[in-house]
Image (spheres, rainbow, N blue to C red):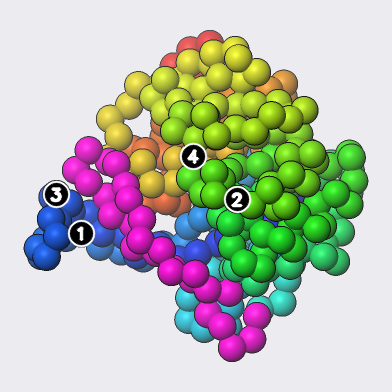
Amino acid sequence: MTRVVSVGNAVVDLLLELPELPRSGADVTATSSRTAVGGSATTLVAARRQGAAAAYAGGHGTGPFGDLVRSALGAEGIAVLADPIRDRDTGWDVAIVEPGGERSFLTTVGAEALGDPHGLVLGAGDLLHVSGYALAREPSGPEIAAWIGSVPREVVVLVDPGPLASTLPREVLAPVVARADWWSANTAEADAIPAGGFRVLIRRGAGGCTVDGVTVPGFAVDAVDTNGAGDVHVGVFLAGLGAGLDAVDAARRANAAAAIAVTRRGPAGAPTRAELDAFLAERGP
């Protein structure tokens, strides 16, 4: 079975829906709040719900947030490959969602930054997800950079750089660029894509995405929360590749999955394979 493995960051999201962003010194009351497990966990959940095996190989702590991450992954049938890091809890963020669905994050770093992939065994059929958040942390970023050249060539490596990629030191970025097979970025991150031999997917929100310069149309929906949509897109795209789809067909499924996800609140809105198939059947070829 195809396995999607992430060396990213699974963290806890404290989600606040606000009527407006506060100005400096002001106090705004949230219209709703909840807790969810996000980050790389969202990517793995999305892949798992499409039928792919999934595994988390990043760092996780021994406190209550680490327990929450492991519980959420276990509930989806996602394996946790590394032992918990002692005396350090998993990090968390406050995810602020505005009325139009746009989100902003305030982040604290925890045990996920201590992830070390050395010892991780990958084989033919595996697809590796590398998160820019993990690359931007110390010491996980340098550890991934030192290890990634040893990843077997038959493993598909996808890098999701996130907003922190432009801050990465050259010694971390260069070996990742050299090994990447895919680079999946949103439009805000597109200008920071480095030169390399990898294929490029640019996520364009409601506009769909482009794959190697080919436009794959999106799907019009009424978005209520864009939190995690990019992670869902990456997970479903990887699951599609692992299932033998060509890149355009995998991207179309990823576009549809992200469209479904933004109609649901919280980062864990990835559809099941049956839900995604029904959505695509309704929308036509």
Which numbered circle lies on residue 32?
1
Horizontal side, residue 170 vs residue 15: left or right: right
Q: Amino acid at mark 1?
A: Ser
For label 3, count other residues whose C-alpha is less than 10 Å away and answer few (under 14), some (14-19) or many (20+). some
Task: Point out residue 277 in the picture as x, y percentages from the top left corner.
Answer: 54, 28
Query: Disc 2 to disc 1, how far (Cα)?
Result: 35 Å
Nearer the camera: disc 3 or disc 1: 3
Taking the magenta stretch, the answer to whether it contains residue 45 is: no
Q: Which residue is mark 2?
A: 168
- Whether residues under marks 1 and 4 lie with C-beta atoms below 8 angstroms apart, the answer is no
Nearer the camera: disc 2 or disc 1: 2
Location of the N terminus by quadrant is: top right
Residue at 67 percent across and 59 percent down: it is 141
Q: Which residue is mark 3?
A: 20
Horizontal side, residue 105 vs residue 154: left or right: left
Q: Amino acid at mark 2?
A: Leu
Label 2 secondary element: loop
Query: Disc 1 to disc 4, how far (Cα)?
Result: 23 Å
- Whether residues under marks 2 and 1 lie with C-beta atoms below 8 angstroms apart, the answer is no
Residue at 61 percent across and 20 percent down: it is 211
Which numbered disc, 4 or 3, marks the residue that appears first in the sequence? 3
Which numbered disc, 3 or 1, marks the residue that appears first in the sequence? 3
Front-most of 151 and 37? 151
Q: Quadrant of residue 205?
A: top left
Nearer the camera: disc 1 or disc 4: 4
Q: Which residues are magenta?
A: 85-111
Considering every residue shown, the one lying at the far front of the view is 170
Label 4 secondary element: helix
Nearer the camera: disc 4 or disc 2: 2
Q: Which residue is mark 4?
A: 230
